Image (cartoon, rainbow, N blue to C red):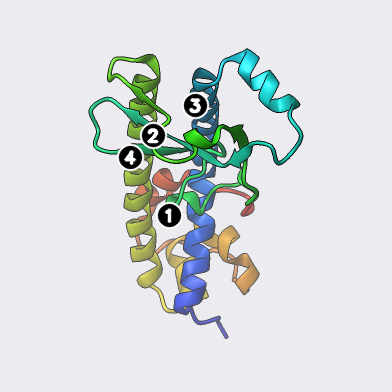
Amino acid sequence: MSTRLTNTTRDQIASAVLTHRFREPVDALIADRAAFAEEVYNDIYRKADREKMAALPKGWLTETAAINVQFGDSRGYESVQFSGKIYGKLGSVKTKDDGKSVERRAFAKNTHGCARVYDADHRLARKHADLGRRFEELKAAFEAAERQVNAALDSATTVNRLVEMWPEVEPFVRPLGTPSPKVPAIPTDQLNKLLDLPVSEAA
């Protein structure tokens, strides 16, 4: 008897498929955001200052996971995370972030309020804007894919039926116990292209 699809198993399958599709660009964005945060930090603290700060015994300076700066004429300031961390559903598909906080030493005066203001035409402000655009584009692509995946999963009530309709999803539902894929009952070419399928097995 085929395994019935529940809301929980649908969520598990959707998560596995979306992680397969988006983990590499999300990991790349996290790495670039972390590198950007390091650039901001190094711009605020000169090399000589960083060397003196590093030489101090632990506990003499505040250690912080982020530093607050303002870019252009935006209202308020932004907390730039040294880990490059991304939150929300998009961040859930990451593989690089192991949950540990990345911290840097900072003067106490720079851990509250705004440490520096960058004009809109400053290279770091422009780089920040580019990273922001990448995030928004990736988020939009993820949300569009998520809607289509959920629609496909909602069209079946059992694992057997899902694999019949969408054979390429079989590696992601294999742990639930699936039959050999049959000829698809609905066109899935567009969905497979969107999700970079098929694959031999789920990550």
Badge 2 marks a residue whose secondary structure is loop
Residue 36's disc number: 3
Tell me how far mark 2 sits from mark 4, CA to CA: 24 Å
Tell me how far mark 3 sits from mark 2, CA to CA: 17 Å
Per the image, the residue denoted by label 2 is 114
* Foreground: disc 1 or disc 2: 2
Badge 1 marks a residue whose secondary structure is helix
Tell me how far mark 3 sits from mark 4, CA to CA: 17 Å
Q: Is residue 44 left or right of residue 123?
A: right
Q: Earlier in the sequence, mark 1 or mark 2?
A: 1
Q: Please say if the residues under marks 1 and 2 sit with CB atoms less than 8 Å apart.
A: no
Vertical position of residue 124 compared to residue 134: above or below? above
Badge 3 marks a residue whose secondary structure is helix
Badge 4 marks a residue whose secondary structure is helix
Tell me how far mark 1 sits from mark 4, CA to CA: 12 Å
Kind of residue at badge 4: Glu
